[in-house]
Image (cartoon, rainbow, N blue to C red):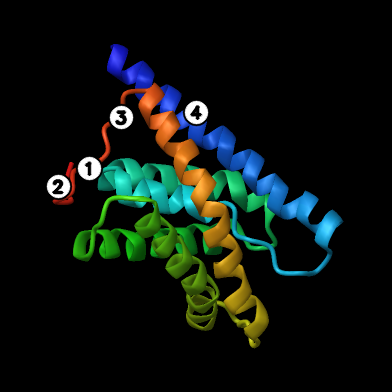
Amino acid sequence: MKDQTKLIKNFAFFLSTLLILTTLETSLWMQVFGTFPSPSFWIPVLVYWSIYRSHKQGLFMAYLMAFIISPLTALPLGMFLLTNLVLFEIAFFVRSRFYQPGVIYFTLVCGLITFSLPIVLLLLSWLIENKPLKDLQVFALFMKPLLTMLVCIPLSYLFMYFDDKTDIALPTETGRQF
């Protein structure tokens, strides 16, 4: 019973952090920096759960993230959920092939997933929608991953602090499966 309450607290920590970070991205960033590309503040949470959790827990968090973030975006829930799941699976695939413990690995995977986001969104739009997206902003394509990677460094320490407080063990150097 005590382990379940700690796991629920861990989910609550991450979901509340996700909500705060996403509102910073969608409202405060626009007020301060205007149309300059913002870092994807929600991607570090998705990547952290794809790297440091089991596949079931990570998928559950990806679904919860989609339901929380979708009202804050212009994407419909179904498209955002599908995009979120594809990005989660890409990060999980990278984890299963190449795993290194530490902040640098986490930061690089966040950059990869942020770079993949507009490409995956464009491909899914072409496959699913009647009127697909047509343009890809090249400046934002390269600037968003760089800014997200800068945000990932302090967030990784915050996430490790959450895990430490709720007694969640990180994987070993061998990248053992849960």
Image spot of residue 174 (x, y percent)? 14, 51
Indicate the secondary structure of the residue bearing disc 1.
loop
Mark positioned earlier in the residue sequence (3 or 2): 3
Q: Residues under labels 1 and 4: Cα distance?
A: 21 Å
Q: What is the quadrant of the C terminus in the image?
A: top left
Is there a contact, CB below 8 Å, between mark 1 and mark 4?
Answer: no
Mark 1 → mark 3, Cα distance in angstroms: 10 Å
Mark with earlier residue (1, 4): 4
Closer mark to the observer between disc 2 and disc 4: 2
Q: Which residue corresponds to mark 2?
A: 176
Residue under numbered circle 3: 168
The answer, for residue 121, to whether it is visible in the render is yes
Quick one: label 2, few (<14), some, or many (20+) residues within 10 Å? Answer: few
The amino acid on which the numbered mark 3 sits, given as a three-letter code, is Ile
Q: Is residue 137 visible?
A: no
Mark 4, residue position = 12
